[in-house]
Every structure is written in C-alpha cells, then in structure tokens.
Amino acid sequence: MTAQASPDGLAEQLRAARQWAGITQEQLAGLSTVSVRAIRDLEQGRVRHPRRETLRLLAGAMRLSDARRAALELAVDGAEAGTVMREAYGAELAPPPKPLRRLVGRAEELRALTGLLATEHERLVSVVGLAGVGKTRLAQEAALLLHGRDRTPVVWVDMTGTAPQPAGPAGTRSPRSALTGWARSLALGGRGLDELASVIRGRDTLLVLDGHDTGPHITPQLLELLHVCERLTVLITTREPHRTPGNRMLPLGPLPVPEPEPGASTGGTGAPGASLTAGQPAVELMLSYVGHMRPDLMPGDSLVRTVARISRALDGVPRAMEAAASWLLLRSPAELLRIAQTAPLDVVDDVTAGEPGGDAAGEGLSALLADAVARLDDGPAALLGDLSLLPDGWSADQAAAGLSATPAGVVRDVHALMLRGLVRRLPGEGGGEEDGAPRFGVLHLVRRLAAERAATLVPATALVSS
C-alpha cells in the first residue's frame, strides 16, 4: 500500500502552489522540465523525499515567493512548514541584526523605547523621525536588549527591500526567510496571516518593520495578526507619522548640538580650554567620523571647536555628519565648516549616493530631505517656509503673532512639523524654559528647501519677533 502524505504535507503544499500559479500539471512540466508523472506522484503523495533540485525547478517555474518556496522545502519530510518552524521557533531562529557600531547619545530614547516594548499594554509602537536621525540604529539596540535579556525572538523585516534575505545551504530558503516573507506580505496588505500566526501564536515575539515609509503602515492583516497573537509586539520605524488606534508614537529628533560659542559668529574661538565634547553626543560622533576619515588630523582644541560648529550646522543628524566627514578627503575642516554653514545640502550626500550599491534605494540624504518637505500639506509647508526666515529661539505664540492665522492652527501645524522632525525643540536657559514657553527652530538642513516650497504656494510672510 502506498503511503500518503498528510494534508498539510508536501503533496498539499505543491498542489496548492500550482493552483495558486494557475497552471496545470502538464504546463508545470513544460516550464520546469520535470516530468508530468513525477509531478503527479508528488501531488498524490507517492513520493515524499524528492531531490532539492527538483523542488527548485518546480518553485522557479511557478515563480513562488520566498515564503511559499520555503514552505515547499520545509515540507519535504511530510510536515507542514508552519509545524517545522513552530518546533524550531525561538530566540536562535529569530535574532535581530547586529549593529556595526555602538549607539551614541541615545540613552534616554533607548530607555523610553525599551520601556514601551517591555510592557504588555503597548503592542504597537512607531519610531518616527527624519531620514538619517538613527531610527534603525535605535530599534536595533532595543531589539538586541530584549533578545539578549528576555530571549525574545525578533522577526526583523527590512521594508526598504534592499537587504538580502537569509538563505540556507546550497541556496535553499531558510525558516527566517519564510518568516520575514510572510511578515512583509502582511505589512503590505498581502497574504501570510495564517502561516505566520501558526508559528508565533502564544509566544513572546517582537516584529520590527524597519523603514516602513509607504502607507498604510497598519494594514487590516497586520491588525488581525496582533489580535490573533496576543503576545506579539510590533515596532515600526518610519519617516511619516501614522495615527492608528493603539499606535504609540515615539518621535526621534537629531542629536542635541552644542550652544553657539561666545564670539563664534565672528570667528572667535570661545573660552580657552572649554570642553566641547563633555555631554555633547553630536560632537563626539562627528569627531569619530572625522578620526576614521582623516586619522592624520590631531584632535586639538581648534579642530574640536570646528567640528562642534559643523555638527551644529548639520543639526546633529548622524547621517549628515557621517557624509560630511567623507568630504574631508577633499576639503579642509575650515572649508567644510564654511560649506556646512552656507549650503549644508552640498555635503550631506557621500560619493555613493545615487549609484548602484550606494545609499538605500539609490537616494542620498538631500533627496530624502527634499521629499520630506514635498510631502507636507500646503498649510504646514507655508508655515515652515515662514518659520525658516526666523533665527532659532521662537515660541509658538511668537510665530502665531506674526501670521494671519489662528494661534490654534499655527500650534497644530508646528506640532505636525515636529513629528516629522523638520522643527526641533531647543534647550532652554539653564536646562529650563524661559517663562515656561518652549523655544523652537527649523532645522538648518531644510531651511532652503522649505523656502523654495513655500514660494510656490504663497508669498513669504515676514515674521516679527516679539
């Protein structure tokens, strides 16, 4: 008597995949070079252990996704893919990616994020911020902490589509590839709910959707997964805020930058011996970039002060500072400072931007910043253009006083600009806020972009400081 595969085994997987592809056994045979008889034997369960090469030929002919291909390969022993992965699922199967460098200046943000992820009451968290501020790096550190401390499996999905997916021996698809494939499909509104839920249901899991910048961020399928898997937490990094019931947003701004030095505007050097690195993560990070790019430059007082001014001109955005440091191969620190202060967008892209194998999706930071301004609605875009004419240190009330708009409307739009990272809150005198009124400033990196966008909408409004 011929043994039959279980309904969830290889026979069922292959038959379902062929029907999904919309082809007959004969058509599959012609496309794959596998005989009709061999295909029929597989679908009827008469052959349980085909060669891997046979499966690869069939999967290629049906143009299967990574997830379906993995399901086929994992079902070779007659078991359904979800069953195999459910037995192996754990921290070892699903680790977060390991960062290549240490996290600088994000202790408070890391504490806040891990606190949110560690509570069962917050199961959908979004880290929102401008391109280049370090959202992915912060998410990596938080995921590593939970993975190492609590042995929490982390299903990390690169939503930009630029990272290679994990593969097994001899090019076979790995369980990790199947998990990330199902999760990516769900995040984009596709299939994979049953497969992914069958693996992670009842287990603590952190699902990270990194770089999920295309909407909608929260699809019905992803919400259903959260309902079905009660111990699942979803972390999203994105440049666009997305208001969904239950979604806790954590805005991530640039690193704090040092206050202007006395005499800096006129070329002075400030107080002799003053420390510009203590408690200044942007300066510390920029110095590390400079040291890697130009080890011949001695980090004396003059260089440290120049680097501090560069980091301030680039708003403390890590990606901008790293790209700017690469231009030290061509420019002196003083020349780089001059360009950063007058035309910062000229130095925020390194030489690989826009080239194959360069920045993510072929876009440099300047293009991503321009896109962030272009995405604004007309109201916030016009306000950002007006605010870009002001020096740092204005309050929301001051901004409203100079515009023919209601204070409530101005405050609402400033809030929207802050969520997108285009406006930052400034530290007050002595660590406090003068008269209890927070002070703000438009990022130097987007001032020109904001003015250009606003000029296409309405004439710029002259603001007067109170």
Image (cartoon, rainbow, N blue to C red):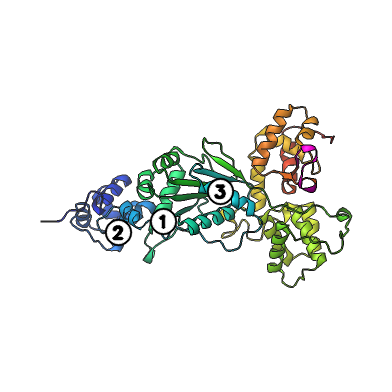
The structure residue drawn at horizontal position 33% and vertical position 53%, both measured from the top left corner, is 71
Look at label 3 and name its amino acid: Gly
| In front of the other: 398 or 172 | 398
Q: Which residue is mark 1?
A: 177
Residue 438 painted magenta = yes
What residue is rendered at 70% in x and 29% in y?
409
Is residue 74 visible to us here? yes
Report the amino acid beneath label 1: Ser
* Res 177 → quadrant: bottom left
Q: CA distance from mark 3 to mark 2?
A: 45 Å
Q: Please, what is the three-letter code of the amino acid marked with disc 2? A: Leu
Residue stretch rendered in magenta on the structure = 430-439
Magenta-span inclusion, residue 378: no
The picture places residue 173, in percent across and down from the top left corner, at 38, 59
Q: Residue at x 49, y 46 (%)?
A: 234
Identify the element where label 3 is drawn: helix
Residue 42: where, in percent of width, then height?
22, 55
Vertical arrangement, residue 16 with respect to residue 274, above or below:
above
Q: Which of the marked residues, 3 or 2, is nearer the chain's N terminus?
A: 2
Q: Quadrant of the C terminus?
A: top right
Q: Could you tell which of marks 2 and 1 lies nearer the N-terminus? A: 2
Observer-side mark, 1 or 3, equals 3
Q: Are marks 2 and 1 in contact (CB under 8 Å)?
A: no
Distance from Cα at disc 1 to Cα at disc 3: 29 Å
**Residue pointed to by mark 2:** 55
Of residues 450 and 288, the one nearer the viewer is 288
Disc marking residue 198? none
Residue position for label 3: 115
